[in-house]
Image (cartoon, rainbow, N blue to C red):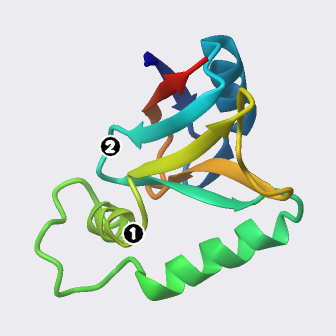
């Protein structure tokens, strides 16, 4: 059994989706692991991870609109407002999505569907530097 671990940093420009499929694919290819599992973990509580369609940008537009309606800013009953009106809604969005994703590895490549991509989902309005850990475990 072999394993390797890498960190990537994604500089966000505010709320939205930031694709990192190519970086993850390169890390898997460089690992020389033919069969195994890629575990991806975001080290933040106001951002999350998604596997989502990467062919039509309307999907990202609609998902952003959905989450803005589902968890709007300005809910006056929220107590945690220290870091601004987008802070607690960002935590709620992260709780509703994922901070860790597992992707199978076969023949040295991630087993993703034709239109699937890996995304950091930034929930805060301000730019942030987000850290993602990628751990590949398997056999050559």
Identify the residue position indicated by label 2 in the image.
44
Quarter residue 106 falls in = top right
Q: x, y (%) of residue 27?
A: 63, 20
On the question of residue 78 being in view, the answer is yes
- In primary-sequence order, the first of circles 2 and 1 is 2
Q: Is residue 3 left or right of residue 52?
A: left
Quarter residue 31 falls in = top right
In this rendering, the answer to whether 83 lies above or below 69 is above
Q: x, y (%) of residue 128?
A: 46, 37
Quarter of the image with the N terminus is top left
Q: Nearer the viewer, residue 25 or 44?
A: 25
Q: x, y (%) of residue 136?
A: 50, 26
* Circle 1 crowding by C-alpha within 10 Å: few under 14, some 14–19, many from 20: many
Q: Is residue 10 left or right of residue 85?
A: right
Residue 11's disc number: none
Real-space CA distance between mark 2 and mark 1, rounded to the nearest whole angstrom: 12 Å
In the image, what residue occupies the spot 65% across and 47% down?
Answer: 118
Q: Nearer the viewer, residue 65 or 106?
A: 106
In the image, what residue occupies the spot 33% across and 37% down?
Answer: 43
Q: Nearer the viewer, residue 19 or 39?
A: 39
* Circle 2 crowding by C-alpha within 10 Å: few under 14, some 14–19, many from 20: some
In this rendering, the answer to whether 7 lies above or below 67 is above
Q: Is residue 89 left or right of residue 48?
A: left
Identify the residue position indicated by label 1 in the image.
93
On the question of residue 13 being in view, the answer is no
**Label 2 secondary element:** loop
Q: x, y (%) of residue 14?
A: 55, 49
Quarter of the image with the C terminus is top right
**Label 1 secondary element:** helix
Q: Are marks 2 and 1 in contact (CB under 8 Å)?
A: no
């Amino acid at each position: 059994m072999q394993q390797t671990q890498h960190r990537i940093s994604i500089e966000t420009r505010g709320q939205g989706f930031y694709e990192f499929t190519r970086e993850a694919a390169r890390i898997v290819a460089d690992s020389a692991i033919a069969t195994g599992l890629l575990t991806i973990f975001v080290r933040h509580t106001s951002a999350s991870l998604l596997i989502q369609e990467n062919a039509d940008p309307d999907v990202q537009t609609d998902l952003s609109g959905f989450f803005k309606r589902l968890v709007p800013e300005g809910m006056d009953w929220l107590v945690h407002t220290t870091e601004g009106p987008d802070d607690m809604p960002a935590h709620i969005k992260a709780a509703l999505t994922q901070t860790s994703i597992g992707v199978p590895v076969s023949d040295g490549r991630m087993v993703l569907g034709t239109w699937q991509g890996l995304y950091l989902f930034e929930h805060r309005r301000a730019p942030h530097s987000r850290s993602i850990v990628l751990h590949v475990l398997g056999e050559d």
